[in-house]
Image: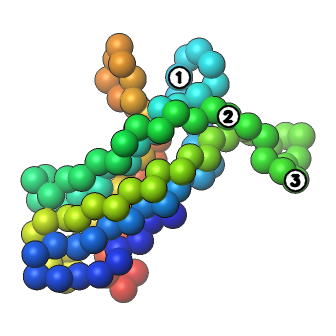
């Protein structure tokens, strides 16, 4: 769950509470070391990043026998996107931290004001 909280002339406060339904990206252990990068499209210097949170796959309560296991993590992140102006697109990228290879992208979303 992520939401822009408020706009102001110097930036936009971002709060990311959690991420749900994430796939396991690690080869061993059915887990992902999840973090989220948030930035204003076209303004790479605005990027903020959550801490890495280890998550392990589990079957959700009420899931059918053919449903895949997934990962839920609590991120509890608050940050500010510097240079935000009304109408900017905000890019959220969920990633798996890999310590020996490049990080895996687990999903992306774009949010615009009012949308």
For label 1, the SS is loop
Tell me where residue 53 appears, x and y as whole percent.
47, 38
Sequence-first disc among 2 and 3: 2
Residue under the image location 78 percent in, 40 percent down? 59
- Category of crowding for the residue at label 3, using alpha-carbon neighbours closer than 10 angstroms: few (below 14), some (14–19), many (at least 20): few
Residue holding disc 2: 57
* C-alpha span from label 2 to label 1: 11 Å
Q: Residues within 10 Å of mark 2 (few under 14, many from 20)?
A: some
The residue that appears at 36% across and 86% down in the rendered structure is 114
Dot placed on the residue nearer the N-terminal end, 2 or 1: 1
Q: Residue at x 10, y 75 (%)?
A: 10
Alpha carbons under labels 2 and 3: distance apart: 15 Å
Answer yes or no: do the residues labelled 3 and 1 have beta carbons within 8 Å?
A: no
Side (left or right) of 57 relative to 46? right
State the residue in front, 95 or 110: 95
Residue 110 visible? The answer is no
User: Residue 2, image x and y in percent?
Assistant: 44, 65
Q: Under tag 3, what secondary structure?
A: loop
Mark 2 in CB contact with mark 1 (< 8 angstroms): no
Q: Residues within 10 Å of mark 1 (few under 14, many from 20)?
A: some
In the rendered view, would you say 80 is above or below 93? below
Residue topped by disc 3: 62
SS of the residue under disc 2: loop
Locate residue 15, reporting x and y percent.
38, 65
Alpha carbons under labels 3 and 1: distance apart = 25 Å
Q: Is residue 38 visible?
A: yes
The residue where tag 1 is placed is 26
96 on left or right of 39: right
Count of picture labels: 3
Q: Earlier in the sequence, mark 3 or mark 1?
A: 1
């Amino acid at each position: 769950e992520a939401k822009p909280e408020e706009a102001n002339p110097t930036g936009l406060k971002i709060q990311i509470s959690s991420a749900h339904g994430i796939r396991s990206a690690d080869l061993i252990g059915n887990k992902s070391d999840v973090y989220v990068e948030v930035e204003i499209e076209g303004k790479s210097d605005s990027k903020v990043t959550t801490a890495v949170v280890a998550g392990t796959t589990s079957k959700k309560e009420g899931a059918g026998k053919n449903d895949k296991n997934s990962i839920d993590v609590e991120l509890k992140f608050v940050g500010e996107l510097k240079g935000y102006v009304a109408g900017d697109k905000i890019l959220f990228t969920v990633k798996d931290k890999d310590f020996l290879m490049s990080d895996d992208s687990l999903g992306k979303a774009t949010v615009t004001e009012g949308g």
